Structure formats: structure tokens, C-alpha cells
């Protein structure tokens, strides 16, 4: 999987993405990360990439030419891939978007700054927009890193256990179940007995039931979209009866 990131802060991207699971994936060659700085494609000796907005108002707007040249340079060096602009006016990133992007062999991520990007650049070069939520951050770098982290986890071999990605929260449209580790008792609180029973089928049922119950309590909208089969509905009914909700 190759990520190309068009950003004014390449050091920020490379530094943060060099840690943890994704950093190891990059070291092992499972994920490739390339950054493109629009300042390198500026048309003047000052490295200008922004200018005042037409119509007036505060702040500056990123110019078309440096961004377009950077994107086209990125397009030219490898196989085709979609150009994604990280913007609050795009659809909110979810598991469906992550899965679709993971099917690509390459994605180009465009990070805006200042008051935004000249709309003509978006019309000319951008294939899709993505948001990470209904709020504004200082630039597209943090959203781009969220996208890369989520997508890279689905690349075969990136996670240490083959089932880890499949069991992640939202992989089945549900929140995650509770997790426990040693010691068996902490501050008088023990581990649910089913987890120490050695009965793998019972553990699987308990985990699914907990995931269903948590999702119903905390994110019922996810269940509304996902739907339940008969077994899942029975598990959820038993969970609600036990917990009084």
C-alpha cells in the first residue's frame, strides 16, 4: 500500500507515522509513505503557496499552481490512485470508506491549510473528499494520518495477528467488547468467569453479546444501520434483561 501526502508539513507526517504498528509496517516495506511539499513547486523564490481571498475576508487561501504541480508530480511516479481532499465538507470517514481505500494499491491525500484551498484546484484534481468529524482542525495533516492509520491496519501482514483487523471495533459494525488481562483480580474486581473457562464457543458468544449490548447502549445508530439476525437479537435481549435496559 502506498500513501502519497501533499502537505506543507512533511516532517510532521513522517515523524508521527514512524511510530508503532504503522512505523513497523513502513520499515518492513508493507506500507510506503511519500510526502510532497507544495512549496517545492512554488512559482517564485519565496516559496509562496497562498494569497489573499477574492472578495475579501480574513486569512489566506492556498494557490492552485503549487498544489496542482505537486499532485501531478505525485500522479506521475507510480500507478494511478484517487486523490482525497481532507475536508469537513466531505462524508464522515467510517469503516466502509476505510475498507474501500484499503482495496486500492495507492492513495494520494491532499492536506489543506489556512482558510482553505482554491476551489478550482479541487475541481481540477480532487476525486473525493473525506472528513473525520463535524469540527475544524488547523489543517489536513491530522485527518490524513487518521485515514492512513485506519487503512494501513487492513493491509495484509501489518497487524501481528491475522485476525486482529477482523476483530477490531466497527469491523462488524459493532463497538468492541470488554478486554481483560493479568492479574485475575484487581481492587476486588475479577475477570468474567467465561473468559477463564477454556470454552472457546462460550467466549465467542459472550464477546458478541457484550459488543451488541455496548453498541445498543452507546451507539444505537450503528445497530439501526446494521440490523441483527435471530441469534444476535436473542443475545441482545438476554443482555438487556440481565442489565435492566
Image (spheres, grey):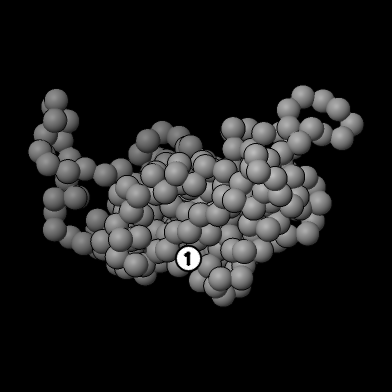
Residue 133 lies in quadrant: top right
> Is the residue 22 above or below the residue 241 in the image?
below
Label 1 neighbour load within 10 Å: few <14, some 14-19, many 20+: many
Query: Residue 241: where, in percent of width, then height?
Result: 40, 40
Q: Is residue 20 left or right of residue 149?
A: left
Residue at (10, 38) in percent of width and height:
183
> Is the residue 211 above or below the residue 1 in the image?
above
Residue at mark 1:
2
Residue at (68, 40) in percent of width and height:
48
Q: Residue furthest right?
A: 55
Is residue 47 something that shows in the picture? yes
Residue at (62, 67) in percent of width and height:
75
Q: Is residue 235 left or right of residue 230?
A: left
Is residue 96 something that shows in the picture? no
Residue 180 lies in quadrant: top left
Residue 166 lies in quadrant: bottom left
Q: Is residue 39 left or right of residue 19?
A: right
> Is the residue 186 above or below the residue 1 in the image?
above
Seen from the viewer's position, the closer of residues 78 and 166 is: 78
Residue at (45, 44) in percent of width and height:
11
Amino acid at each position: 500500500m502506498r500513501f502519497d501526502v501533499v502537505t506543507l508539513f512533511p516532517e510532521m507526517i513522517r515523524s508521527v507515522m514512524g511510530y508503532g504498528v504503522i512505523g513497523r509496517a513502513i520499515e518492513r516495506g508493507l506500507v510506503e509513505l511519500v510526502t510532497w511539499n507544495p512549496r517545492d513547486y512554488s512559482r517564485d523564490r519565496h516559496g509562496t503557496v497562498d494569497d489573499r481571498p477574492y472578495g475579501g475576508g480574513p486569512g489566506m487561501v492556498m494557490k492552485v499552481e503549487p498544489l496542482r504541480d505537486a499532485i501531478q508530480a505525485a500522479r506521475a511516479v507510480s500507478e494511478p490512485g484517487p486523490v482525497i481532499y481532507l475536508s469537513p465538507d466531505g462524508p464522515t470517514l467510517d469503516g466502509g470508506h476505510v475498507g474501500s481505500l484499503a482495496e486500492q494499491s495507492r492513495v494520494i491525500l491532499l492536506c489543506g491549510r489556512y482558510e482553505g484551498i482554491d476551489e478550482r484546484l479541487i475541481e481540477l484534481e480532487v476525486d473525493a473528499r473525506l472528513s473525520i468529524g463535524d469540527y475544524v482542525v488547523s489543517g489536513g495533516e491530522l485527518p490524513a494520518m487518521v485515514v492512513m492509520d485506519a487503512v494501513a491496519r487492513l493491509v495484509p501482514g501489518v497487524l501481528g495477528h491475522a485476525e486482529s483487523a477482523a476483530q477490531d471495533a466497527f469491523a462488524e459494525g459493532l463497538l468492541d467488547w470488554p478486554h481483560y488481562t493479568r492479574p485475575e483480580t484487581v481492587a476486588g474486581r475479577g475477570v468474567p468467569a467465561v473468559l477463564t473457562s477454556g470454552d472457546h464457543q462460550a467466549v465467542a458468544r459472550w464477546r458478541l453479546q457484550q459488543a451488541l449490548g455496548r453498541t445498543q447502549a452507546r451507539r444505537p445508530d450503528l445497530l439501526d444501520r446494521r440490523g441483527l439476525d435471530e441469534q444476535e437479537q436473542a443475545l441482545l435481549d438476554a443482555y438487556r434483561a440481565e442489565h435492566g435496559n
